[in-house]
Amino acid sequence: MLNVIDEYTRECLAIRIDRKITSNDLVEELAELFVTRGTPTHIRSDNGPEFVAETVRLWLRRVGVGTLFIEPGSPSREWIHRIVQRKVKGRAVKRRGL
C-alpha cells in the first residue's frame, strides 16, 4: 500500500493498493501528483525498496525534488501513514465480508 500525505496539511493526496508496488509504479503515481498538485521541493519517505531504487532517485533528481528519509523506528514521522493504512485496510475487509 502506498500512501502519499502532505506533511503540512495532513491531506491524503493518493492511496495505491496493490500486491506489489514497483519503482515504476511509484514514479507514475508521483508524476501524476506533480502534474496536478505542483512539484514539491522534497519528499519524505521510509526506506522501502521502491523509494531507494535508482529509477526513483534519478527521476526525482531530474525533476528537481530532494529526498528525505524517515529514520527506521521513528514513529513520530510514520503515525499518520499508519492511521490511513489501518482505516483503508478496515474498509477493505468490511467490503469483502471477512
Image (tube, rainbow, N blue to C red):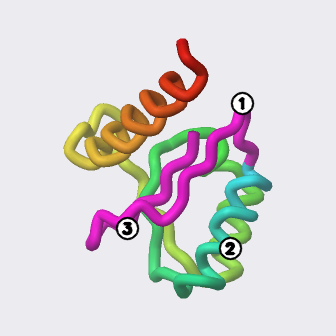
Residue 6 shows which numbered tag? 3
Q: Amino acid at mark 2?
A: Glu
The numbered mark, 3 or 1, whose residue comes first in the sequence reads 3
| Residue type pointed to by label 1 | Arg
**Few, some or many C-alpha atoms within 10 Å of disc 1 (few <14, some 14-19, many ≥20)?**
few
Looking at the image, do the residues carrying marks 2 and 1 touch, with CB atoms under 8 Å apart? no
Residue at 38% from the left image edge and 32% from the top image edge: 86
Q: Earlier in the sequence, mark 2 or mark 1?
A: 1
Residue 19, numbered circle: 1
Q: Earlier in the sequence, mark 3 or mark 2?
A: 3
Q: Is residue 67 above or below residue 73?
A: below
Mark 3: secondary structure:
loop
Check contact, mark 3 vs mark 1: CB within 8 A. Answer: no
Callout 2 environment at 10 Å: few (<14), some (14 to 19), or many (20+)? Answer: few
> Residue 20, percent across and down?
72, 34
Identify the mark at residue 32; answer none if there is no mark.
Answer: 2
- Which of these two is toward me, 59 or 36? 36
Q: Over which residues does the magenta segment extend?
A: 1-22
Q: How many marks?
A: 3
